[in-house]
């Protein structure tokens, strides 16, 4: 459990059909829905199409995540707080914080992923392979509180924290294939295991 440091949770409750009385879409429901979705759908895009709305719904009811916030480590520039950990549970569920001005290496995740911003703002730059390990930039996207992005396993990106406050995000990943996870060097056109 991390230091209690409130951050703004800006996922607004949307009108959805519920069975009275109201009950939150709890983390354990999200976790079991994830297993069901991944078992039912083999294609990562089909999975993400169903996972992202559930993440958004979960976050409308999850102000309690504040209690799991860990300030970014001053040396590393980031912190990770595991939100669920069970042997053989195949997904990674984290609260991640980055310090202002921090940047990540250019990397892929070799699995599907969803990143939902809770506080701060982050620029995601996207890249694609051209030839061999050479990559070229294909665009970027600013991610602000209340917004979520989804990645397929081959998505190559890097992030940069904008503004003067740490970013806090809810991150969800499938099972990483570490033989296909790389850090890229856009100048030397090389890739190494990450
Ligand atoms: Fe990433």
Image (cartoon, rainbow, N blue to C red):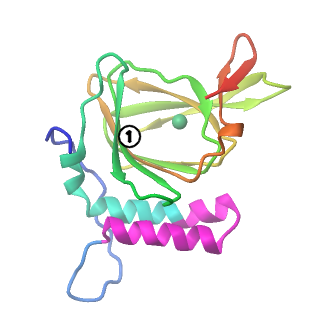
**Which SS does the magenta portion mostly show?**
helix
Quarter of the image holding residue 145?
top left
Residue found at x 35% / y 69%: 28
Give the left or right position of residue 43, taking residue 111 as reference. Answer: right
Quarter of the image holding residue 58?
bottom left
Give the left or right position of residue 150, taking residue 74 as reference. Answer: right
Tell me the quadrant of the picture where the C terminus can be found: top right
Q: Is residue 39 magenta?
A: yes
Q: Which residue is mark 1?
A: 144
Q: Residue furthest top?
A: 188
Magenta span: 25-50
Picture coordinates of residue 117 (x, y %)? 37, 44
Tell me the quadrant of the picture where the N terminus can be found: top left
Q: Residue furthest bottom?
A: 20
Q: Nearer the viewer, residue 177 or 171?
A: 177
Residue found at x 26% / y 64%: 61
Q: Residue furthest front?
A: 87
Q: Nearer the viewer, residue 46 or 75?
A: 75
Asked which secondary structure carries label 1, the reply is loop
Residue found at x 54% / y 74%: 36
Q: Is residue 191 above or below residue 53?
A: above
Quarter of the image holding residue 184?
top right
Q: Is residue 58 magenta?
A: no
Picture coordinates of residue 67 (x, y %)? 18, 48
Few, some or many residues within 10 Å of mark 1 (<14, 14–19, 20+): some
Residue found at x 52% / y 69%: 35
Picture coordinates of residue 4 (x, y %)? 13, 41
Q: Is residue 127 above or below residue 54?
A: above
Give the left or right position of residue 107, taking residue 10 as reference. Answer: right
């Amino acid at each position: 459990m991390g230091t209690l440091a409130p951050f703004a949770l800006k996922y607004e409750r949307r009108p959805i059909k519920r069975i009275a009385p109201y009950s939150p879409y709890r983390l354990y429901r999200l976790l079991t829905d994830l297993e069901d979705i991944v078992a039912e759908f083999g294609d990562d895009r089909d999975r993400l199409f169903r996972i992202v709305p559930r993440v958004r719904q979960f976050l409308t009811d999850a102000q309690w995540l504040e209690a799991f916030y860990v300030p970014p480590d001053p040396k590393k520039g980031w912190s990770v707080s595991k939100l669920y950990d069970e042997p053989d549970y195949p997904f990674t569920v984290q609260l991640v914080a980055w310090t202002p001005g921090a940047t990540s290496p250019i990397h892929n995740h070799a699995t599907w992923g969803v990143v939902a911003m809770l506080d701060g703002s982050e620029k995601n730059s996207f890249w694609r392979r051209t030839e061999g390990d050479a990559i070229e930039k294909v665009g970027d996207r600013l991610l602000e509180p209340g917004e979520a992005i989804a990645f397929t396993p081959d998505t190559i990106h890097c992030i940069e924290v904008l503004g003067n406050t740490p970013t806090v995000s809810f991150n969800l990943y499938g099972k990483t294939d570490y033989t296909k996870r790389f850090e890229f060097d856009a100048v030397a056109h090389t890739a190494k295991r990450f």
